[in-house]
Amino acid sequence: MTQFVFALFFFLVSHAVPARPTVREWLRRLLGSRTYLLLYSLVSILLLGWLIRSAAQAPFIPLWTLTLGQYWVPILIMPIAFFLLIAGAVSPNPLSISFSPRGFDADRPGIVGVTRHPILWAFALWSFSHVVPNGDLVSLIMFGGFGLFALSAIRAIDRRKARALGARWTDLASRTSAWPFAALLADRASWRWPKGLLSISLGVAIGSYCAMLWLHPILFGPDPKIAFLSL
Protein backbone atom coordinates (compact mmCIF):
# COMPACT_ATOMS: atom_id res chain seq x y z
CA MET A 1 0.00 0.00 0.00
CA THR A 2 2.94 2.37 0.69
CA GLN A 3 4.18 2.15 -2.88
CA PHE A 4 0.66 2.84 -4.18
CA VAL A 5 0.37 5.96 -2.00
CA PHE A 6 3.73 7.25 -3.25
CA ALA A 7 2.89 6.50 -6.88
CA LEU A 8 -0.48 8.23 -6.55
CA PHE A 9 1.16 11.23 -4.87
CA PHE A 10 3.78 11.68 -7.60
CA PHE A 11 1.21 11.18 -10.35
CA LEU A 12 -1.04 13.89 -8.91
CA VAL A 13 1.90 16.26 -8.31
CA SER A 14 3.12 15.74 -11.88
CA HIS A 15 -0.25 17.03 -13.10
CA ALA A 16 -0.96 19.65 -10.44
CA VAL A 17 2.36 21.52 -10.62
CA PRO A 18 2.47 22.03 -14.42
CA ALA A 19 -1.18 23.10 -14.26
CA ARG A 20 -0.09 26.30 -12.52
CA PRO A 21 0.08 28.98 -15.26
CA THR A 22 3.46 30.40 -14.20
CA VAL A 23 5.12 26.95 -14.08
CA ARG A 24 3.53 25.80 -17.33
CA GLU A 25 4.54 28.94 -19.25
CA TRP A 26 8.09 28.76 -17.91
CA LEU A 27 8.38 25.15 -19.08
CA ARG A 28 6.90 26.04 -22.48
CA ARG A 29 9.43 28.85 -22.97
CA LEU A 30 12.28 26.63 -21.82
CA LEU A 31 11.40 23.55 -23.91
CA GLY A 32 9.05 24.81 -26.60
CA SER A 33 5.35 23.95 -26.69
CA ARG A 34 5.58 20.69 -28.64
CA THR A 35 8.59 19.36 -26.70
CA TYR A 36 6.90 20.29 -23.44
CA LEU A 37 3.72 18.40 -24.40
CA LEU A 38 5.66 15.35 -25.55
CA LEU A 39 7.79 15.20 -22.39
CA TYR A 40 4.75 15.85 -20.20
CA SER A 41 2.90 13.00 -21.89
CA LEU A 42 5.88 10.65 -21.58
CA VAL A 43 6.30 11.36 -17.87
CA SER A 44 2.56 10.94 -17.34
CA ILE A 45 2.56 7.55 -19.09
CA LEU A 46 5.54 6.31 -17.07
CA LEU A 47 4.01 7.45 -13.78
CA LEU A 48 0.68 5.94 -14.79
CA GLY A 49 2.39 2.61 -15.45
CA TRP A 50 4.07 2.75 -12.04
CA LEU A 51 0.77 3.62 -10.38
CA ILE A 52 -1.10 0.75 -12.03
CA ARG A 53 1.67 -1.69 -11.15
CA SER A 54 1.73 -0.58 -7.52
CA ALA A 55 -2.07 -0.78 -7.36
CA ALA A 56 -1.91 -4.39 -8.56
CA GLN A 57 0.52 -5.19 -5.74
CA ALA A 58 -1.47 -3.38 -3.02
CA PRO A 59 -3.70 -5.31 -0.56
CA PHE A 60 -7.03 -6.34 -2.11
CA ILE A 61 -9.96 -4.91 -0.16
CA PRO A 62 -13.17 -6.03 -1.95
CA LEU A 63 -16.13 -3.69 -2.20
CA TRP A 64 -18.50 -5.74 -4.39
CA THR A 65 -18.76 -9.20 -5.90
CA LEU A 66 -17.02 -9.62 -9.25
CA THR A 67 -18.48 -11.48 -12.23
CA LEU A 68 -17.12 -12.23 -15.69
CA GLY A 69 -19.86 -10.11 -17.21
CA GLN A 70 -18.42 -6.97 -15.60
CA TYR A 71 -15.40 -7.24 -17.89
CA TRP A 72 -17.67 -6.35 -20.81
CA VAL A 73 -17.92 -2.77 -19.56
CA PRO A 74 -14.32 -1.78 -20.48
CA ILE A 75 -14.31 -4.10 -23.51
CA LEU A 76 -17.25 -2.18 -25.00
CA ILE A 77 -16.24 1.29 -23.78
CA MET A 78 -12.52 1.23 -24.61
CA PRO A 79 -12.90 1.29 -28.44
CA ILE A 80 -14.69 4.63 -28.02
CA ALA A 81 -12.00 5.84 -25.63
CA PHE A 82 -9.21 4.85 -28.04
CA PHE A 83 -10.94 6.64 -30.91
CA LEU A 84 -11.39 9.83 -28.86
CA LEU A 85 -7.76 9.65 -27.73
CA ILE A 86 -6.24 9.11 -31.18
CA ALA A 87 -8.56 11.53 -32.96
CA GLY A 88 -7.97 14.15 -30.29
CA ALA A 89 -4.20 13.76 -30.49
CA VAL A 90 -3.92 14.07 -34.30
CA SER A 91 -6.62 16.72 -34.83
CA PRO A 92 -5.89 20.46 -34.62
CA ASN A 93 -7.67 21.82 -31.56
CA PRO A 94 -7.03 25.31 -30.16
CA LEU A 95 -9.56 24.70 -27.37
CA SER A 96 -7.93 21.76 -25.58
CA ILE A 97 -5.08 19.24 -25.67
CA SER A 98 -3.72 18.47 -29.14
CA PHE A 99 -0.44 17.34 -30.72
CA SER A 100 -1.27 18.49 -34.24
CA PRO A 101 0.73 21.41 -35.69
CA ARG A 102 -1.90 22.08 -38.37
CA GLY A 103 -4.23 25.05 -38.23
CA PHE A 104 -7.80 24.58 -37.04
CA ASP A 105 -10.65 24.90 -39.55
CA ALA A 106 -13.96 25.53 -37.76
CA ASP A 107 -15.84 24.33 -40.88
CA ARG A 108 -14.00 20.99 -40.70
CA PRO A 109 -13.64 20.49 -36.94
CA GLY A 110 -13.56 16.69 -37.00
CA ILE A 111 -13.56 15.27 -33.48
CA VAL A 112 -13.67 18.81 -32.05
CA GLY A 113 -17.20 19.03 -33.42
CA VAL A 114 -18.11 16.07 -31.23
CA THR A 115 -16.45 17.53 -28.13
CA ARG A 116 -13.74 20.12 -27.65
CA HIS A 117 -12.08 17.85 -25.07
CA PRO A 118 -11.78 14.42 -26.75
CA ILE A 119 -8.59 13.38 -24.94
CA LEU A 120 -10.01 14.20 -21.52
CA TRP A 121 -13.21 12.29 -22.29
CA ALA A 122 -11.11 9.33 -23.45
CA PHE A 123 -9.31 9.44 -20.12
CA ALA A 124 -12.61 9.66 -18.21
CA LEU A 125 -14.15 6.73 -20.11
CA TRP A 126 -11.04 4.63 -19.53
CA SER A 127 -11.08 5.45 -15.83
CA PHE A 128 -14.74 4.89 -15.00
CA SER A 129 -15.05 1.76 -17.17
CA HIS A 130 -12.18 0.16 -15.25
CA VAL A 131 -13.84 0.73 -11.87
CA VAL A 132 -16.54 -1.86 -12.64
CA PRO A 133 -14.46 -5.03 -13.25
CA ASN A 134 -12.09 -4.42 -10.34
CA GLY A 135 -14.37 -3.95 -7.34
CA ASP A 136 -11.76 -3.17 -4.69
CA LEU A 137 -10.88 -0.08 -2.67
CA VAL A 138 -7.53 0.70 -4.32
CA SER A 139 -9.00 0.47 -7.83
CA LEU A 140 -11.94 2.66 -6.86
CA ILE A 141 -9.58 5.30 -5.48
CA MET A 142 -7.26 5.14 -8.47
CA PHE A 143 -9.65 4.84 -11.41
CA GLY A 144 -12.42 6.90 -9.82
CA GLY A 145 -9.90 9.60 -8.98
CA PHE A 146 -8.60 9.61 -12.56
CA GLY A 147 -12.11 10.03 -13.92
CA LEU A 148 -12.95 12.90 -11.59
CA PHE A 149 -9.60 14.53 -12.38
CA ALA A 150 -10.32 14.36 -16.11
CA LEU A 151 -13.80 15.86 -15.73
CA SER A 152 -12.53 18.67 -13.48
CA ALA A 153 -9.77 19.41 -16.02
CA ILE A 154 -12.45 20.13 -18.64
CA ARG A 155 -13.70 23.15 -16.69
CA ALA A 156 -10.17 24.27 -15.86
CA ILE A 157 -9.04 24.19 -19.50
CA ASP A 158 -12.18 26.00 -20.64
CA ARG A 159 -11.45 28.83 -18.21
CA ARG A 160 -7.79 29.00 -19.18
CA LYS A 161 -8.49 28.97 -22.92
CA ALA A 162 -11.23 31.59 -22.52
CA ARG A 163 -8.73 33.94 -20.86
CA ALA A 164 -6.04 33.23 -23.45
CA LEU A 165 -8.18 33.40 -26.61
CA GLY A 166 -10.79 35.97 -25.61
CA ALA A 167 -13.37 36.60 -28.33
CA ARG A 168 -11.94 33.81 -30.50
CA TRP A 169 -12.68 31.29 -27.76
CA THR A 170 -16.29 32.49 -27.57
CA ASP A 171 -16.68 32.09 -31.32
CA LEU A 172 -15.03 28.66 -31.55
CA ALA A 173 -16.65 27.32 -28.38
CA SER A 174 -20.08 28.23 -29.75
CA ARG A 175 -19.45 25.72 -32.56
CA THR A 176 -18.63 22.82 -30.28
CA SER A 177 -19.42 21.60 -26.77
CA ALA A 178 -17.74 20.23 -23.69
CA TRP A 179 -20.30 17.39 -23.51
CA PRO A 180 -19.95 14.91 -26.39
CA PHE A 181 -22.46 15.36 -29.23
CA ALA A 182 -24.27 18.27 -27.53
CA ALA A 183 -23.28 20.79 -30.21
CA LEU A 184 -23.97 18.33 -33.04
CA LEU A 185 -27.45 17.57 -31.71
CA ALA A 186 -28.11 21.30 -31.33
CA ASP A 187 -26.96 21.82 -34.95
CA ARG A 188 -24.15 24.14 -33.81
CA ALA A 189 -21.28 21.93 -34.99
CA SER A 190 -20.21 20.24 -38.19
CA TRP A 191 -19.28 16.56 -38.59
CA ARG A 192 -16.90 17.34 -41.47
CA TRP A 193 -13.30 16.19 -40.89
CA PRO A 194 -9.94 17.46 -42.15
CA LYS A 195 -8.88 15.32 -45.09
CA GLY A 196 -7.71 11.85 -44.09
CA LEU A 197 -8.00 12.29 -40.32
CA LEU A 198 -11.14 10.20 -39.84
CA SER A 199 -9.71 7.12 -41.54
CA ILE A 200 -6.36 7.56 -39.79
CA SER A 201 -8.04 7.94 -36.41
CA LEU A 202 -10.27 4.89 -36.93
CA GLY A 203 -7.41 2.73 -38.19
CA VAL A 204 -4.97 3.61 -35.41
CA ALA A 205 -7.69 3.36 -32.74
CA ILE A 206 -8.78 -0.12 -33.88
CA GLY A 207 -5.18 -1.30 -34.08
CA SER A 208 -4.34 0.15 -30.66
CA TYR A 209 -7.42 -1.39 -29.08
CA CYS A 210 -6.69 -4.86 -30.46
CA ALA A 211 -3.04 -4.62 -29.40
CA MET A 212 -3.99 -3.55 -25.88
CA LEU A 213 -6.60 -6.30 -25.62
CA TRP A 214 -3.87 -8.90 -26.16
CA LEU A 215 -1.07 -7.11 -24.28
CA HIS A 216 -3.16 -6.18 -21.24
CA PRO A 217 -2.39 -9.38 -19.26
CA ILE A 218 1.33 -8.96 -19.99
CA LEU A 219 1.49 -5.27 -19.08
CA PHE A 220 -1.06 -5.01 -16.29
CA GLY A 221 -1.99 -8.51 -15.11
CA PRO A 222 -5.78 -8.99 -15.54
CA ASP A 223 -6.89 -10.47 -18.86
CA PRO A 224 -10.05 -8.72 -20.13
CA LYS A 225 -10.59 -11.49 -22.67
CA ILE A 226 -11.98 -13.72 -19.93
CA ALA A 227 -15.25 -11.82 -20.48
CA PHE A 228 -15.79 -14.02 -23.53
CA LEU A 229 -16.12 -17.00 -21.16
CA SER A 230 -19.43 -15.49 -19.99
CA LEU A 231 -21.01 -15.91 -23.43
Image (spheres, rainbow, N blue to C red):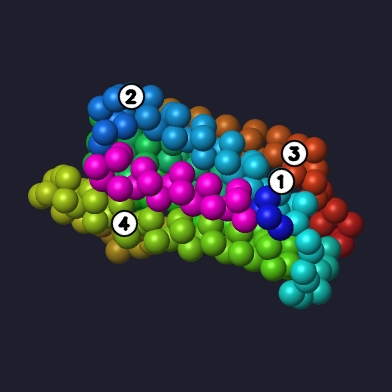
Disc nearest the viewer among 2 and 3: 2
Indicate which label's residue lies in the foreground, 2 or 4: 2
Query: Percent position (x, y) of residue 189?
Result: 29, 52
Q: What residue is shown with label 1?
A: 53
Give the Cα distance between marks 1 and 4.
Answer: 29 Å
Task: Work out whether mark 2 precedes mark 3 in sequence or the reverse, and give the earlier one.
Answer: 2
Q: Quadrant of the C terminus?
A: bottom right
Q: CA distance from mark 2 to mark 1?
A: 30 Å
Q: Is residue 125 above or below residue 194?
A: below
First-in-chain label (1 vs 4): 1
> Which stretch is magenta?
5-24
Work out whether mark 2 precedes mark 1 in sequence or the reverse, and give the earlier one: 2
Callout 2 touching callout 3 (CB < 8 Å): no
Q: Earlier in the sequence, mark 4 or mark 3?
A: 4
Q: Main secondary structure of the magenta part?
A: helix
Sequence-first tag of 2 and 4: 2
Residue 225 is covered by the magenta coloring: no
The kind of residue on which mark 3 rests is Leu
Give the CA distance from mark 2 to mark 4: 23 Å
Residue 159 placed where, x, y %? 24, 56
Determine which residue is flagged by label 3.
Answer: 219
